[in-house]
Amino acid sequence: MSDGLRIGALAKRADCPVETIRYYEQAGLLPKPARSQGNYRLYSNVHIERLSFIRHCRSLDMTLKEIRTLLRFSDAPEKNCGEVNALLDEHIGHVAERIVELKILESQLKDLRALCSKTRAAKDCGILNKLTEHVVAHAQKKTNTGHVHGAHARGGK
Amino acid sequence: MSDGLRIGALAKRADCPVETIRYYEQAGLLPKPARSQGNYRLYSNVHIERLSFIRHCRSLDMTLKEIRTLLRFSDAPEKNCGEVNALLDEHIGHVAERIVELKILESQLKDLRALCSKTRAAKDCGILNKLTEHVVAHAQKKTNTGHVHGAHARGGK
DNA sequence: TTAAGACCCTGTAGTTACTCTAGAGTCAAA
DNA sequence: TTTGACTCTAGAGTAACTACAGGGTCTTAA
């Protein structure tokens, strides 16, 4: 019967890299845990649940800022949860928007790809030639909320 | 008949922020232009075309690294363009993958949203309660190439 | 007793593709 | 001459980590 989990054990349990846990603490998402004599972090059930919450939200592609908002509600059980619903609706909207954008992108890329069917000299490559033309329409809106990522993912290994 | 465009004029022509042009130069994507007596950058047609190429690629969500590769072909007209085709195929693959991922995400978010139909006390909110549960399945693969973005976009204003 | 190995600590730098600011210089028109 | 629009460099900030470097701690085995 120990006084809590050490960071490695918590990491395994939450399927989350050790460095990321320390990062969440520093970012104010996870409360500072107790420390052992040797200055090791010791986590309790509270931390396990909270980390679980955070990782669940992250797996749903929410930003840390959004998660911070949700945690504020989680911490104030008597508060009205209308804002939670709104946040989620907005997030769903962003994801839906991004899907539409990526589909447009996909068809543009396929059109481009069709311009060069076989390997040839670069100067005759329809793709390279097309790319040099002036851009008229952009796939990406500038009226974006600055909230939904492009086509290139994080995620390692 | 001047000796070239200044950065502001080029920016307008390519619909690209001034700072971004300087950034591309520093990143080695745009060659260093001539300078005026007052040390202003002076751009020629070569630069206009190259910036157009870059912006076109960016609007197709390619990374600067990918664009660098394409530019190498653009600069070597006798080289075989097979690698260009391969790069594009791979990029199309990433976009397609990301669309699938986002669709899964979208349905998960909608399921979650359905858990709380009206506003109530946070402690009774089905969404918050669900998020606290332990995560079993992740929407995001870890076997990712580290190449296709999440659901949150760049894009300003 | 000591040494190996697994684990943990802090602090800092790197990643991507910009975006923004500070503080200063250039140039044409009023 | 002074205003205003434009430009310059250098450096910091963004998101969410990831990856060190250089050390300390703890358990186990020889």
Image (cartoon, coloured by chain):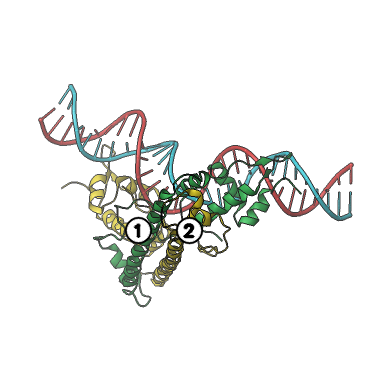
Chain colours: A green, B yellow, C red, D cyan
What's the CA distance linking mark 1 and mark 2? 26 Å
Closer to us: B55 or A6: A6
- Which of the 4 quarters of the picture holds residue A132? bottom left
SS at badge 1 = helix
Q: Which label belongs to residue A42? A: none
Disc 1 marks which residue?
B58
Q: Chain of mark 1?
A: B
Q: Is residue B134 visible?
A: yes
> In the rendered image of this protein, does residue B17 appear above or below residue A110?
above
Q: Position of residue A29 (x, y in %)?
A: 54, 45
**Looking at the image, do the residues carrying marks 1 and 2 touch, with CB atoms under 8 Å apart?**
no
Label annotation for residue A60: 2
Q: Report the amino acid beneath label 1.
A: Arg
Check disc 2 and report its element: helix, strand or loop. loop
Between residue B28 and residue A32, name the one nearer to us.
A32
Q: Looking at the picture, does residue B26 appear above or below residue B139?
A: above
Residue B61 location, quadrant: bottom left
Residue A140 location (% of width, % of height): 31, 58
**Amino acid type of the residue that numbered disc 2 sits on in the rendered structure:** Leu
The answer to whether residue B77 of the structure is visible from this angle is no
Q: Position of residue A121 (x, y in %)?
A: 35, 72
Query: In terms of image quadrants, where is residue B57?
Result: bottom left
**Circle 2 crowding by C-alpha within 10 Å: few under 14, some 14–19, many from 20:** many
